[in-house]
Image: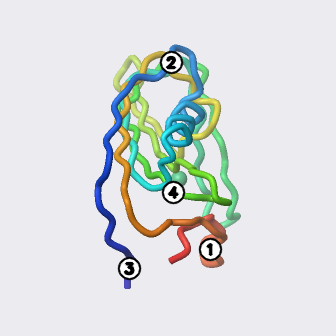
């Protein structure tokens, strides 16, 4: 059975990413500046280069892929919660190339924006804190 809690929507922040900035770093910075501990993030735009992860369920390790090329962000979606008491963004990203081919994965530091428009929704409710989940080896929400 799925485990869940009810939260309520609070502020909504809309903005743009700095040219040639690290996307995760920028979005986490906005959360810290505004004391946002719980919420949702989405963005579109383009990147100079990207780093995305694929979680190997058998070895329980992330394999990271780097794309040193200009790509469109067709979708970036994720959530904001707490890890070790600090806001952390868990996001996945889809990226398209000049031929319309799409790749993507778990958004990692090292993905550098060319341009980006983001929306952050702040939620209010009990903290969602991440801790090691024994079934998956991932830092999932402890509920
Ligand atoms: Zn992920």
Report x, y in % for residue 28: 55, 39
Q: Element under label 1?
A: loop
The residue that appears at 64% across and 69% down in the rendered structure is 131
Name the quadrant containing residue 25: top right
Report x, y in % for residue 31: 50, 42
Report x, y in % for residue 52: 57, 39
Q: Element under label 4?
A: strand
Residue 118 in the figure: left or right of residue 85: left
Mark in the foreground, 1 or 2: 2
> Colour scheme of this structure image?
rainbow
Mark in the foreground, 4 or 1: 4
In three-dimensional space, the C-alpha distance between marks 2 and 3, rounded to whole angstroms, equals 38 Å
In three-dimensional space, the C-alpha distance between marks 2 and 4, rounded to whole angstroms, equals 23 Å
Mark sitting earlier along the chain (4/1): 4
Name the quadrant containing residue 2: bottom left
Kindly identify which numbered label has been placed on residue 81: 4
Task: Locate the N terminus and report the quarter of the image it occupies.
Answer: bottom left
Q: Residues within 10 Å of mark 1 (few under 14, many from 20)?
A: few
Name the quadrant containing residue 136: bottom right
Kindly identify which numbered label has been placed on residue 133: 1
Kindly identify which numbered label has been placed on residue 18: 2
The residue that appears at 62% across and 53% down in the rendered structure is 86
């Amino acid at each position: 059975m799925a485990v869940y809690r009810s939260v309520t929507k609070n502020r909504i922040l809309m903005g743009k990413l700095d040219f040639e900035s690290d996307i995760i770093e920028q979005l986490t910075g906005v959360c810290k500046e505004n004391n946002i501990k719980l919420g949702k993030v989405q963005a579109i735009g383009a990147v100079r280069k990207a780093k995305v992860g694929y979680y190997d369920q058998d070895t329980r390790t992330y394999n990271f892929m780097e794309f040193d090329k200009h790509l469109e962000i067709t979708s970036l979606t994720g959530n904001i919660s707490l890890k070790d008491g600090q806001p952390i963004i868990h996001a996945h990203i889809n990226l398209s190339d000049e031929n319309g081919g799409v790749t993507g994965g778990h958004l990692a530091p090292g993905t550098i924006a060319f341009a980006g428009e983001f929306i952050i929704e702040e939620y209010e409710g009990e903290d969602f804190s991440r801790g090691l989940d024994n079934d998956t080896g991932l830092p999932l929400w402890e509920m």
